Amino acid sequence: MQYRELGNTGLLVSEIGMGCEGFFEKDCTMAKELFDLAEREGINYFDLYASDPELRKAVGNALSGRREKFIIQSHICSVWKNGQYLRTRNLAEVKAGFAEMLDLLQTDYIDVGMIHYCDAEKDWKEIVDNGILDYARELKAKGQIRHIGLSSHNPVVALKAIESDSIEVLMFSVNPVYDLQPPTENVDDLWADDVYRNTYTNMDPDRQRLYEVCQSKGVGITVMKCFAGGDLLSAELSPAGAALTPTQCIHYCLTRPAVATVLCGAHSTEQLMESIAYETASDTERDYAAAFASFPKISWNGHCMYCSHCAPCPVRISVADVTKFLNLAISNGAVPETVREHYKVLEAHASDCVECGACESRCPFGVAIRKNMRKAVEVFGY
């Protein structure tokens, strides 16, 4: 298992994490089976958005005796009321729900306290105005949560929260079809059939900017909806008109800026092993570029996907890295110090480009790489 830094939190998290949907299986006894497998395979990060007390109790029991081996991302504002899940912004309900969560999980702290499900600008305002954000800060000051997070499906709202400098971790829906969609306050739009009737070209700029701002600010992204609810794994159901493998979906997410871990949904140990297999997959098995280039309903023409098909460069430029740092600088309107330093330590720089065009001949997406190299020299100075 490979591990990544979760933004600036100081946490090292496994590239493959666990979503919590499968914990419900077999009257919640699946929770222990999945945690046993996770421990054996080196998974140390999981998400717990669900508020069902029986599920939380099962997770607490599964963690018993090994709490320190796992990094918990659990949700503030997800509560259980009248026998069902509720997203609430009522501060009294939030406080009671958090206290109950700690008790059921048999712990006195949560590593990432995730403010739950914020997809509308008015909702973010309510989180601020109703004291929810202040409560999260209070919990952090007490050590009951170590880092403040936010979960969202809307890049405009998420970016507004990130730019407030209040959020350290973002849980966001990332996959190659959702990344085409413009911002919406209705999450159902992301998987509605009618939005995919036309051919889409290139990533939505708001999503691209969100990932790049998170990277430049040191906000770690934890990925939900990697498989689009399983649709991307089926040629019949996929909005792209063709199927991807779990390994290709995971690799796409892990090559986006700021992404630290992919929270893979699994309803059995076999399904979780399919995701864990990413760690031993070959470069060919991970490669999503050829599949993307052949999708009948989607085109990424002209857009760098950081797939590294441009390599090898005869003068050893890491074209994908230079392009990523260039995009980060452009999205910030200046060169952040961290981006400048990362660019500086590259083995070769854009100014070393001899404009042979070999990279462009290999790019599946027709990116104007030589033009990007000239732009990078202009932005970075060499």
Image (cartoon, rainbow, N blue to C red):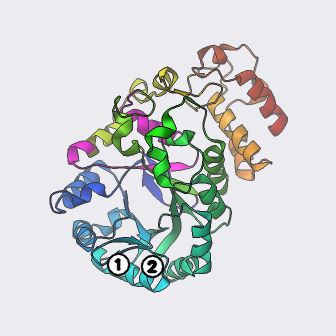
Do the residues under discs 1 and 2 have CB atoms within 8 angstroms? yes
List x then y, in percent, for residue 272.
28, 46
Q: Measuring 45% from the left and 73% from the top, which residue is drawn there?
A: 77
Which residue is rendered at x = 22% and y = 70% of the image?
61
Q: Nearer the viewer, mark 1 or mark 2?
A: 1
Q: Which of the image's four quarters has the C terminus?
A: top right
**Residue 23 place in picture, x, y as percent:** 25, 59
- Mark sitting earlier along the chain (1/2): 1
Question: Is residue 245 inside the magenta stretch?
Answer: yes
Q: Position of residue 237 (x, y in %)?
A: 36, 34
Q: Amino acid at mark 1?
A: Leu
User: At numbered mark 2, what does the secondary structure look like: helix, strand or loop?
Assistant: loop
Name which quarter of the figure residue 271 lies in: top left
Mark identifier at residue 144: 2
Q: Secondary structure at mark 1?
A: helix
User: Is the residue marked by circle 2 packed among few (<14), some (14-19), or many (20+) residues within 10 Å?
Assistant: many
- Residue type (three-letter) at the residue carrying disc 2: Gln
Is 107 a magenta residue? no
Q: Which of these two is toward me, 111 or 115?
A: 115
From the viewer's perspective, tell me whether residue 232 is left or right of residue 182: left
**Cα gap from disc 1 to disc 2, whole angstroms:** 9 Å
What's drawn in magenta, residue-wise? 242-271
Q: Residue furthest front?
A: 194
Judge whether 140 appears above or below 17 on screen: below
Image vertical order of residue 159 relative to residue 206, above or below: below
